Image (cartoon, rainbow, N blue to C red):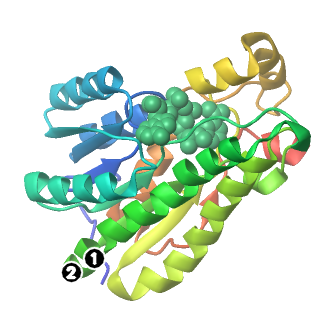
Amino acid sequence: MFESIEGRPAASLEGKVAFITGSGRGMGRAHAVLMANRGADIAIHDVNKDWAEETGELVRAAGRKALVMIEDVADIEAMAAHAKTAEEELGRIDILVNNAGVGAERTGIEGVDPAFFDRLFNIHLRGHFFLTQAVVPGMKARNYGRILNVSSMWAMTGHHYGATYTAMKSALLGLTKAWAKEFAPHNITVNAIAPGGVWSQMAIEKEGLESFTARSKKTPIGRFADLDENAALVAFLCSDEAAFITGQTIGPNGGQAIVGI
Ligand SMILES: NC(=O)c1ccc[n+]([C@@H]2O[C@H](COP(=O)([O-])OP(=O)(O)OC[C@H]3O[C@@H](n4cnc5c(N)ncnc54)[C@H](O)[C@@H]3O)[C@@H](O)[C@H]2O)c1
């Protein structure tokens, strides 16, 4: 049932609890901070303790509760236990952002070994599939949920040096559609974003500053996104205002996808 948003601040997340994977730095941190500024308590998760604790400080500085959890998202039993802890300590999980990720192979098919393939599968897909499995029963019990999968523009366009990454990010779009249908009767929406280039450390380290800068200038908008530029979209899709949006993928990419770079 649609809850009236009349008279409330735009995309308010007042009183909500969000669990955000990979929120130690980069876009995940930006989602955590903006959601906290809009009223949500945050379960911060990352494999890197220092980064996750820094995000925790930023969330607390915004006046919200922060629960910091350190884990490899690929460890599905440990992640399920963290989801339970977050529900106990923060009261529930209303919003799940499946964001943690690592970069593409940047090589053709000959350069991909099974260990790399399995690692990308375990982080991007298997880890987030089973974390979602752990979180959904609580959402069903409360008849409310927002799930946001962080895919990539490459899932829409493909990339000649990123087939493994593209495959895993494409699978997330499949999950987005299937889960949207499966969970809709429980008032749980499932959407995805498929960002183009974003100035994260991961993207710069993977591609190299020179090449990344040169490519950014070829987008119709003439640049790649700042780290926090997709956070408002994610917060909106995870708000009550987006109650009628489900199974959708939105591509914040400055027009990059239409010129194919
Ligand atoms: N930067 C881009 O251009 C771009 C474009 C499209 C999609 N993405 C996706 O956006 C998401 C965020 O990436 P980002 O660019 O902010 O990179 P980032 O490296 O700044 O942030 C990723 C975070 O995930 C964490 N992480 C990585 N592997 C993990 C694991 N196994 N377990 C737990 N945490 C883990 C990292 O420690 C880091 O804090 C990723 O899923 C990425 O694939 C990025």
Q: Is residue 222 left or right of residue 121?
A: right
Helix or strand or loop: what does disc 1 sit on?
helix
Instruction: Tell me the distance, in whole angstroms, between the alpha carbons under discs 1 and 2.
Output: 6 Å
Left or right: residue 169 versus residue 81 is right
Identify residue type, mark 2: Ala
The amino acid type of the residue labelled 1 equals: Pro
Check contact, mark 1 vs mark 2: CB within 8 A.
Answer: yes
* Circle 1 residue: 137
On the image, the x and y values in percent for residue 192 come to 56, 59
Q: Is residue 60 left or right of residue 54?
A: left
Q: Residue furthest front?
A: 114
Residue at point 17%, 62% (across, down): 92
- Classify residue 254 by image quadrant: top right
Residue 68 x, y percent position in the rendering: 22, 36
Depth check: 260 or 101 in front? Answer: 101
The quadrant of the image that shows the N terminus is: bottom left
The residue depicted at 19 percent of the width and 52 percent of the height is 14
Q: Which label sits on residue 141?
A: 2
Q: Residue 191, image x and y in percent?
A: 52, 64
In this view, the mark in front (1 or 2): 1
Q: Is residue 132 above or below residue 98?
A: below
Q: Residue at x 48, y 69 (%)?
A: 190
Of 6 and 40, which appears nearest the observer? 40
Residue at 59% in and 25% down? 202
- Say if 108 sits above or below 94 in the image: above
Q: Is residue 12 visible?
A: no
Spot occupied by residue 238 in the image (x, y as percentages of width and height): 39, 58
